[in-house]
Image (cartoon, helix red, strand yellow):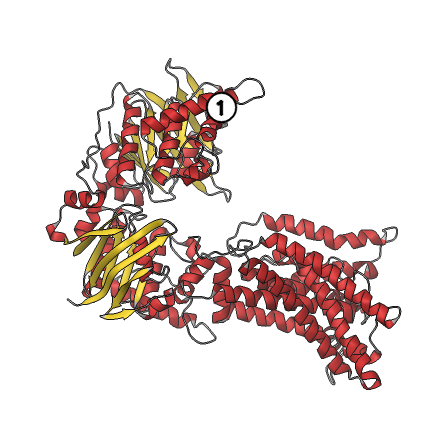
């Protein structure tokens, strides 16, 4: 096995932040190298330097044994390096073929037919399925990823870098992707996959390089590694990877949803006849391919989405029923019903980035003040309490929340919602972009709420987490309920099938 | 019948400056620059184009060539528009100033500068600036042997001034450029998603500059048409009079397609000359004058509810691109 890429002592700083420090790495032909690390450990930055987006402050890069200088993505293509970014870089209104040839040198005209032919040749070779004439905005996430990978191959890449390629895929799609990557490996290409999912590293890679805080701490052949050893390498200390889960105690129905249907502005049904019951003292997971109605479901329970038809009935502690469909969030609060929502877009919907922590706390409480002056003391005390309780790292309560790290922002948001002592807590993708430690803090908080008898709904994308944390999982498929399953007995593969094929499975739990 | 032919030819003449403005702005917006300076660039084109002809005639005297005079008007009018586009590009692409504010400033500057140059020329001519008949005839209707003489068709297709054919050629060229050529594909990518274009090795800055400057030049030609053809080579105070703004609206009505822009411009051109060909008793001229603007408002309302992804403003339009801001 020959070495195709060697990175020597690369350092890259952004202002005062060191993203990479003295990183050394090598990649060989015909292997799959996993680059493992938490968010912010500098994996993507390092790979961006290989693909010409960033330029290293110091250090050397060798391709096929020769020292090279990569100043732009074009330089990288010329050296046979292609990167598939985590956030797809595709132009929505163009076709797959147009995106694939974008930026390539050539004659005055773009020969679209010939391009399409060449694309189909590549897809036959590696087992992709693609329609070169399809516009990107009509494509599913996995189709877009396919376009990205073909784009890289079309440019004759010998070294492929994939940044978190599985984050948005279903288990079946992941299997397909891995098959393709193995074919590339057999074709003697070098594949680098950036990931923080330990399971994938074990199944797919030949070697794994672990990054921590901008440094490459270790490189090991995968067969010599275990999930536990990799996780400890990533975090830098011993940790327990299991999420505790208690049996729900005295579960009673809290929120009865029946026939819930929502429409998007074009009249398409984003939710279609969704019915389920949310109980106290349990965590109900919501799984589905991205865009299957999770967002609409969370928002319609909290009054943010207008409901086309169906009912959302809240059952009070005394058994009294209140119909929530059609009420605005403030009307719901006015009835004394506390439904808390932690949206996926934390700094867009959850918090105001330019306001400080106290002001963000006040967004929930300012209505309660009497007279014309706002009360800053109570929220300030609450903010101080939160900082202590959740160990939020911040220069103080007066710092704008947007300057905090993702994990701390989430703690502020979740903490604020929990402080309102909700009876229903809806959380959407609460650990997206968070490191392992912060993620586990979030899981603990949710479990604590569950034990306090709160009905928790958790929309998540990592099926492993859903399976470990939740009591039941509601699987959405194209806006319909495909199944409500027992999280203790169901398998990942079964959920994957439910996510892609509408069925009517309902486990008695 | 006769009346209809007159109406159609008048509509074409009224549509031409609008189409120049619309095409120029489409090209500009395809690069992601929302240049609201069309009115200003048209004014600059109008005044500078006229000045070029006027000064040329003054310098040469009796032996002035109408052809050369027309070419100078077109070239300098175009360059005046390019200058407008260049100022805008420097402000927004290089200095990253707000696009809307820069465009409005360009309009204010262009209107002032155009009128200033025009009046100054008038002072110099001792009254009002006007070109001679040689130049005027170069900008008048074509007489193509064998074609212009044909009944009806000759008058509807082969009797216009050369700038009408120029604008149609520009529209056809732009359709081809945007849909078939490699540079057109790259330009569309820049306007839709500059970060993606950048990552694919497309020089975003160069495309933005070129498209905005050439687009500005095309807008300037609209101005030349106004001063040289519509005003018969004389400077009339405020001669552009809002046509640039209608062009900006037409870009939206045409959904950023040069082909639809031809239809849109014809429609608006027709509406703006309607009063002369379909006079209704007791309806004052002012009401007719409102019609094109009213139609603009109505069409903007109807087209803004359109949801199709294809017929949309280039996604990055109005937002400056910073490479570091990933």
Residue B68 percent location from the top left of the image? 73, 82
Residue A318 in the image: above or below residue A365: above
Q: Nearer the viewer, residue A85 or B170?
A: A85
Please name the residue shown 75% across and 76% down the image. Answer: B159
- Name the subunit of mark 1: A
Residue B237 percent location from the top left of the image? 81, 62
Q: Nearer the viewer, residue B82 or B132?
A: B82
Residue highlighted by disc 1: A376
User: Label 1 crowding class (10 Å Cα cut-off): few <14, some 14-19, many 20+?
Assistant: some
Residue A403 percent location from the top left of the image? 42, 40
For the question of whether residue A142 can be seen, the reply is yes
Residue B47 in the image: above or below residue B71: above
What is the residue that sits farthest to the left in this orientation?
Answer: A224
Residue at disc 1, secondary structure: loop
Residue A451 image-quadrant placement:
top left
Residue A491 image-quadrant placement:
top left
Residue B271 in the image: above or below residue B145: above
Please name the residue shown 81% across and 71% down the image. Answer: B232
Residue B318 in the image: above or below residue B55: above
- Considering the image in quadrants, where does the C terminus of chain A appear? top left
Please name the residue shown 39% across and 32% down the image. Answer: A413
Q: Count numbered badges in the picture.
A: 1
What is the residue that sits farthest to the top in this orientation?
Answer: A318
Is B214 left, or right, of A296 in this rendering?
Answer: right
Q: Nearer the viewer, residue A377 or A412?
A: A377
Residue A77 percent location from the top left of the image? 34, 68
- Considering the image in quadrants, where does the N terminus of chain A appear? bottom left
Is B166 left, or right, of A256 in this rendering?
Answer: right
Is B324 left, or right, of B125 in this rendering?
Answer: left
For the question of whether residue B246 can be seen, the reply is no
């Amino acid at each position: 096995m020959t070495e195709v890429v060697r990175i020597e002592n690369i350092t890259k700083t952004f202002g005062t932040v060191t993203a990479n420090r003295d990183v050394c790495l090598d990649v060989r032909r015909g292997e799959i190298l996993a680059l493992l690390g938490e968010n912010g450990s500098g994996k993507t930055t390092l790979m961006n330097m290989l693909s010409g987006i960033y330029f290293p402050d110091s250090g050397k890069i060798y391709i096929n044994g020769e020292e090279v200088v990569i100043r732009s993505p074009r330089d990288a293509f010329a050296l046979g390096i292609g990167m598939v970014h985590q956030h797809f870089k595709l132009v929505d209104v163009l076709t797959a073929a147009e995106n694939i040839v974008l930026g390539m040198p050539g004659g005055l005209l773009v020969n679209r037919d010939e391009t399409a032919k060449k694309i189909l040749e590549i897809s036959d070779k590696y087992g992709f399925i693609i329609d070169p004439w399809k516009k990107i905005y009509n494509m599913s996430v996995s189709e877009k990823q396919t376009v990205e990978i073909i784009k890289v191959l079309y440019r004759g890449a010998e070294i492929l870098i994939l940044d978190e390629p599985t984050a948005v895929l279903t288990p079946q799609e992941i299997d397909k992707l891995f098959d393709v990557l193995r074919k590339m490996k057999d074709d003697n290409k070098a594949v680098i996959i950036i990931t923080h999912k330990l399971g994938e590293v074990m199944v797919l890679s030949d070697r794994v390089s672990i990054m921590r805080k901008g440094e490459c701490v270790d490189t090991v052949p995968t067969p010599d590694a275990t999930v536990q050893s990799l996780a400890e390498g990533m975090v830098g200390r011993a940790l327990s990877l299991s999420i505790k889960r208690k049996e729900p105690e005295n579960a009673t129905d809290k929120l009865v949803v029946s026939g819930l249907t929502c429409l998007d502005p074009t009249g398409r049904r984003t939710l279609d006849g969704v019915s389920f019951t949310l109980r106290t003292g349990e965590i109900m997971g919501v799984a589905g391919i991205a865009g299957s109605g999770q967002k609409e479901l969370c928002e319609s329970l909290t009054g943010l989405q207008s409901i086309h038809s169906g009912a959302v009935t809240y059952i009070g502690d005394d058994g009294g029923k209140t119909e929530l469909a059609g009420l605005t969030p403030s009307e719901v609060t006015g009835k004394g019903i506390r439904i808390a929502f932690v949206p996926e877009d934390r700094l867009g919907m959850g918090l105001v980035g330019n306001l400080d922590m106290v002001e963000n706390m006040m967004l929930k409480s300012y209505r309660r003040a009497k007279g014309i002056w706002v009360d800053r003391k109570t929220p300030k005390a609450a903010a101080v309490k939160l900082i202590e309780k959740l160990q939020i790292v911040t220069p103080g309560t007066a710092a704008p929340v947007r300057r905090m790290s993702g994990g701390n922002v989430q703690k502020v948001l979740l903490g604020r919602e929990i402080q309102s002592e909700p009876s229903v807590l809806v959380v959407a993708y609460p650990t997206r972009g968070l490191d392992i430690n912060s993620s586990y803090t979030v899981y603990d908080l949710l479990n604590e709420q569950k034990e306090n008898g709160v009905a928790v709904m958790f929309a998540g994308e990592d099926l492993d987490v859903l399976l470990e944390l939740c009591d039941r999982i509601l699987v959405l498929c194209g806006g319909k309920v495909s199944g409500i399953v027992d999280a203790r007995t169901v398998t990942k593969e079964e959920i994957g099938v439910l996510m892609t094929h509408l069925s009517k499975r309902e486990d008695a739990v | 019948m006769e009346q209809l032919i007159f109406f159609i030819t008048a509509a074409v003449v009224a549509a031409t400056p609008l189409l120049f403005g619309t095409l120029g702005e489409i090209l500009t917006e395809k690069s992601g620059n929302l240049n609201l300076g069309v009115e200003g660039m048209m004014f600059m084109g109008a005044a500078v184009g006229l000045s070029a002809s006027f000064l040329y005639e003054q310098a040469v005297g009796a032996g002035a060539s109408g052809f050369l005079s027309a070419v100078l008007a077109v070239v300098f009018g175009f360059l005046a528009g390019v200058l407008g586009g260049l100022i805008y590009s420097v402000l927004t692409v290089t200095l990253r100033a707000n696009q809307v504010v820069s465009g409005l400033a360009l309009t204010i500057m262009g209107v002032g500068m155009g009128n200033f140059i025009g009046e100054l020329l008038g002072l110099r001519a001792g009254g009002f600036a006007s070109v001679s008949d040689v130049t005027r005839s170069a900008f008048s209707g074509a007489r193509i042997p064998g074609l212009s003489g044909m009944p009806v068709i000759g008058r509807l297709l082969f009797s216009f001034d050369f700038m009408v054919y120029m604008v149609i050629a520009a529209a056809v060229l732009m359709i081809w450029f945007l849909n078939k050529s490699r540079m057109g594909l790259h330009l569309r990518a820049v306007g839709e998603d500059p970060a993606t274009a950048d990552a694919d090795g497309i020089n975003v800055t160069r495309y933005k500059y070129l498209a905005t400057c050439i687009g500005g030049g095309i807008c300037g030609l609209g101005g030349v048409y106004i001063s040289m053809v519509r005003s018969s080579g004389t400077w009339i105070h405020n001669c552009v009079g809002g046509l640039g703004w209608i062009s900006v609206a037409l870009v939206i009505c045409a959904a950023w397609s040069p082909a639809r822009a031809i239809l849109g411009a014809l429609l608006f051109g027709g509406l703006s000359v309607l009063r002369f060909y379909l006079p209704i008793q007791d309806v004052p001229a002012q009401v007719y004058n409102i019609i094109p603007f009213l139609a603009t408002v109505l069409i903007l309302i109807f087209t803004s509810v359109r949801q199709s992804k294809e017929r949309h403003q280039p996604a990055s339009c109005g937002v400056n691109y910073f490479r570091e801001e990933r």
